[in-house]
Amino acid sequence: MFCAIMLVANVSAQKITEFLPEKPADTAVVVCPGGSYYWLAKRGEGSEVAQWLNDNGYAAYVLEYPVSGWWSWFTHIRRSCCTQYPGQLDALGDALKTVKSKGYKVVGAMGFSAGGHLVMSGAEFLPDGVAPDFVAPIYPVITMREPYVHKRSRRGLMGERRQHDPAMWDSLSLELHADRVRCPVFLLSCVDDPTVDWHNAAMMADSLRAYNRVPVYYMNPRQGGHGFGVNREKMDKHEVKDVLAWPETFLRFLRGQLVGE
């Protein structure tokens, strides 16, 4: 496995870390860690996921998109407007352009928690040629509206002032814009998730299926919690077959969508 770091232009020195499998890959995945749009779970939802993708023959690029940090979370003061919407979406768009320029046949995006909101936003709002070829939002933030909103992510994404704007809630509640999605979608949420209500992913799946335009697979185990990534030790404590099976289920889903795979 080879690892390299590349800077993404125009995004406040945010970076992509490249993880390559032993054999050349036709498919790459941009990985977006979670962290409420305030911080990034770089290991459990970043490098560990990238290494798992490498082990299964896929190239991976972990994106450190703009976040405002613990200081902003505590003080409600931001040091840069780039750490709120659309700074994160711009970073994802630049990352996808960079990875697509490397000649992969397929470039998708996988995101966790707030990172799941980001990759789903990419599927809805980025233009053709830039948008991901598939997305996998895992225990994702989706809605910005009550009663299922994850309020910390809403503030992290929108900023201290815009978090109170109902028009912004609607514009970034992704279940309301499912008609924009043009790629296959794999969703996962656990009923016992204590952080992001599982209805976020369920609403997204229902909205996508209502339009019946793209392949959708939704896993909804009873137990599993939040923040487990692909770490089997974190999933093992629940001893629930469904959540333990999600990585292999995703790989089967992905292989079923890839031409010539």
Image (cartoon, helix red, strand yellow):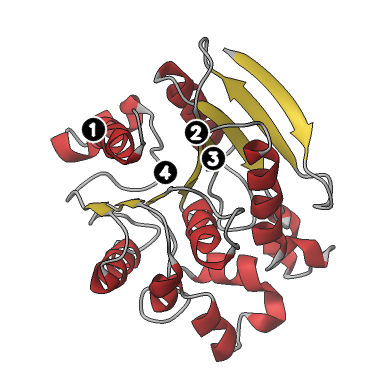
Q: Position of residue 53 (x, y in %)?
A: 45, 26
Give the residue drawn at x 53%, y 63%. 121
Q: Position of residue 166 (x, y in %)?
A: 54, 89
Q: Is residue 197 above or below residue 228?
A: below
Label 4–label 3 contact, CB within 8 A: no
Residue in the foreground of this view, choosing between 147 and 184:
184
Q: Which mark is residue 31?
A: 3
Query: Could you classify mark 3 by the number of other residues whose Cα lies within 10 Å: few (under 14), some (14-19), or many (20 or more)?
Result: many
Label 4–label 2 contact, CB within 8 A: yes
The kind of residue on which mark 2 rests is Gly
Query: Could you classify mark 1 by the number of other residues whose Cα lies within 10 Å: few (under 14), some (14-19), or many (20 or more)?
Result: many
Q: Which mark is residue 44?
A: 2
Give the residue drawn at x 47%, y 30%. 49
Question: What whole-number distance in Å separates the C-alpha atoms at marks 2 and 3?
Answer: 11 Å
Left or right: 23 as drawn, with respect to 197:
right
Q: Is residue 255 above or below residue 89?
A: above
Label 2–label 1 contact, CB within 8 A: no
Whether residue 41 can be seen here = yes
Q: Earlier in the sequence, mark 4 or mark 2?
A: 2
Label 1–label 3 contact, CB within 8 A: no
Q: Earlier in the sequence, mark 2 or mark 1?
A: 2
Question: What whole-number distance in Å separates the C-alpha atoms at marks 4 and 3?
Answer: 14 Å
Q: Marks 4 and 1: which is nearer the front?
A: 1
Residue in the foreground of this view, choosing between 168 and 210:
210
Whether residue 149 can be seen here = no
Q: Which mark is residue 227?
A: 4
